[in-house]
Image (cartoon, rainbow, N blue to C red):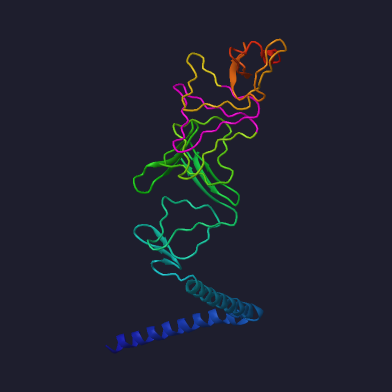
Amino acid sequence: MDRSTNLDIEELKMTREQYILATQQNNLPRAENAQLYPVGIYGWRKRCLYFFVLLLLVTMIVNLAMTIWILKVMNFTVDGMGNLRVTKKGIRLEGISEFLLPLYVKEIHSRKDSPLVLQSDRNVTVNARNHMGQLTGQLTVGADAVEAQCKRFEVRASEDGRVLFSADEDGITIGAEKLKVTGTEGAVFGHSVETPHIRAEPSQDLRLESPTRSLIMEAPRGVQVSAAAGDFKAACRKELHLQSTEGEIFLNAATIRLGNLPTGSPSSSSPSPSHSRQTVHELCVCPNGKLYLSPAGAGSTCQSSSNICLWS
């Protein structure tokens, strides 16, 4: 028992001495050749790092403040931004809005209690395109004119949807019950006008005038001019022609007057009337159809006063 104990003690001593010797051998060269290196960032590098960290912190604070300011000014909410509200039916815009670039929408509505106003410093242009992007219709409201470019332009009544005005390549149709022209110069037509009825306003005169050219009224089944409560006057500077190719010219009145007809003078061989002032004349006709008056006598005096026909 004592012997085994002594052996264990000796083994422990030898192990302890070996550990001390090994430790001393390892420490001796390190103590001779060891060089100390500082761990970390020192000097100007440390100051630059602190400066960049401080600059990053200031930038973050400024960005956060600007973000909060923009949210405050633009009035960002969960429903939209400022006067712009996003609803289930679309986008609702309150107040005056300015669009700097083209606006593509399907439908624009105003509130029930306010009108819809489109305003521009130059012009307002509304374009319509097909599925291929080709322009099919255009409405331009400018400072000088309102222009519409389309295949057919229509204006309909608000009550029954009746077409009041339509225009296309074939012609212009006016579907209103009455077309009223209130200008002092009236209506000017560059070409022919086809209408079944022309009527003036009550207690107003109807005047058809061509200042420099002729005025022609044509109808295959007749032209009727009627003045139920007044006079009908036809005046011209040179000649007034009444012509009927197949029918007749019928004058039906209680009194028919032909004023300013020339009066023929009797020849020297014919007897002169007995009265100094002739009040009764005979209506004579030249071979070319010219009418003239001849002093009436016991018989016909047209032959003796036929000198008018020689100069006609």
Residue visible at 60% across and 54% down in the picture: 122
Q: Nearer the viewer, residue 67 or 154?
A: 154
Asked if the magenta segment contains residue 218, the reply would be yes
Q: Whole-percent x and y of residue 209?
A: 58, 35
Left or right of 46 on screen, residue 86: left
Question: Tag count in the figure?
Answer: 0
Name the one closer to the observer, 265 or 120.
Answer: 265
Give residue 278's position: percent from left, percent from top: 63, 23
Q: Position of residue 139 (x, y in %)?
A: 51, 46
- Give, as a single range, the part of the protein colored magenta: 212-241
Q: Position of residue 147 (x, y in %)?
A: 55, 44
Which residue occupies the foreground of this view, 26 or 82?
Answer: 82
Figure quadrant of residue 299: top right
Taking the magenta stretch, the answer to whether it contains residue 121 is no
Q: Is residue 115 above or below residue 296?
A: below
Q: Is residue 34 visible?
A: no
Magenta: main secondary structure equals loop
Q: Is residue 113 visible?
A: yes
For the point 47% across and 51% down, which residue is it?
A: 104
Quarter of the figure that contains the C terminus: top right
Extreme-bottom residue of the structure: 2
Q: What is the quadrant of residue 29 in the picture?
A: bottom right
Q: Residue furthest front?
A: 274
**Left or right: 204 as drawn, with respect to 157:** right
Q: Which residue is farthest right?
A: 268
